[in-house]
Image (spheres, grey):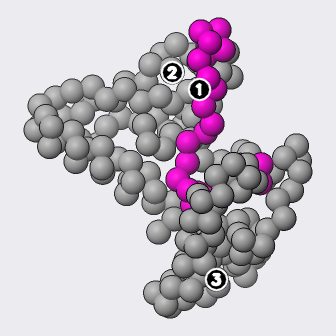
């Protein structure tokens, strides 16, 4: 289950985030085992100082985590400056098509520049609300957008407006 937004007796809430384990850690480990067996190796992970709370030792003995950006004391802004200095394009923050941690600016950009992806996200938004198992397990409907409105109908706010998710946003470590 994705960390969708929902109403709670106290206002708006989110379901527990399970994406990292299900869609990143387990698939990466599975592929590494297929390719290398259980030989020991180092896995480099690109967490910057902005994401230091995400850096943790591996939970399996055959993998040692290495964090080169932390070793170099680099923040996200430092990475962007390095890319600019070396004339590399600045990538957008990575995220699944249905990631509820997207800002209004990101949703709006997706709607304008990738309408097929936005349509796919809208379908997922509808499915998580209309799925009978979801209705059975949750007292309130689920949404991809923090407004608790169907994604297809949301009028995205001014991209310069502060968003409460800026501090809690997904750090963009998807699909490393």
Q: Looking at the picture, how far across and down is residue 93, in whole percent? A: 61, 39
Q: Looking at the picture, how far across and down is residue 169, in whole percent? A: 65, 48
Q: Residue at x 66, y 14 (%)?
A: 84
SS assignment at label 3: loop
Residue 86 placement, left or right of 56: right
Q: Are marks 2 and 1 in contact (CB under 8 Å)?
A: yes
Q: Which residue is mark 1?
A: 49
Distance CA(mark 2)–CA(mark 1) = 6 Å
Q: Residue at x 66, y 58 (%)?
A: 115
Question: In the rendered view of the protein, which quadrant contains the C terminus?
Answer: top left
Vertical side of 96 occupied by 88: above or below: above
Q: Which residue is mark 2?
A: 70
On whether residue 149 falls in the magenta region, the answer is no
Q: Main secondary structure of the magenta part?
A: loop
Q: Looking at the picture, how far across and down is residue 52, in whole percent? A: 54, 32
Vertical side of 148 occupied by 40: above or below: above
Q: Which residue is mark 3?
A: 141
Q: Are marks 3 and 1 in contact (CB under 8 Å)?
A: no
Magenta range: 82-106
Residue 122 makes an appearance in the image: yes
SS assignment at label 1: helix
Vertical side of 29 occupied by 151: above or below: below
SS assignment at label 2: helix
Question: Which is nearer the N-term, disc 2 or disc 1?
Answer: 1
Q: Are marks 2 and 3 in contact (CB under 8 Å)?
A: no
Q: Looking at the picture, how far across and down is residue 121, in whole percent? A: 59, 64
């Amino acid at each position: 289950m994705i960390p969708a937004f929902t109403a709670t007796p106290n206002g708006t809430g989110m379901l527990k985030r399970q994406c990292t384990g299900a869609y990143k850690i387990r698939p990466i480990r599975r592929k590494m085992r297929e390719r290398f067996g259980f030989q020991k190796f180092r896995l480099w992970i690109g967490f910057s100082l902005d994401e230091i709370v995400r850096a943790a030792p591996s939970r399996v003995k055959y993998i040692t985590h290495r964090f080169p950006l932390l070793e170099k004391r680099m923040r996200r802004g430092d990475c962007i400056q390095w890319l600019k200095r070396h004339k590399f394009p600045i990538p957008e923050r990575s995220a699944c098509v249905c990631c509820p941690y997207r800002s209004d600016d990101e949703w709006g950009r997706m709607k304008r520049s990738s309408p097929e992806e936005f349509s796919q996200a809208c379908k997922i938004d509808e499915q998580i609300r209309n799925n009978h198992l979801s209705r059975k397990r949750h007292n309130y409907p689920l949404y991809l957008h923090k407004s608790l409105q169907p994604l297809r109908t949301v009028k995205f706010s001014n991209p310069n407006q502060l968003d409460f998710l800026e501090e809690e946003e997904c750090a963009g470590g998807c699909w490393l």
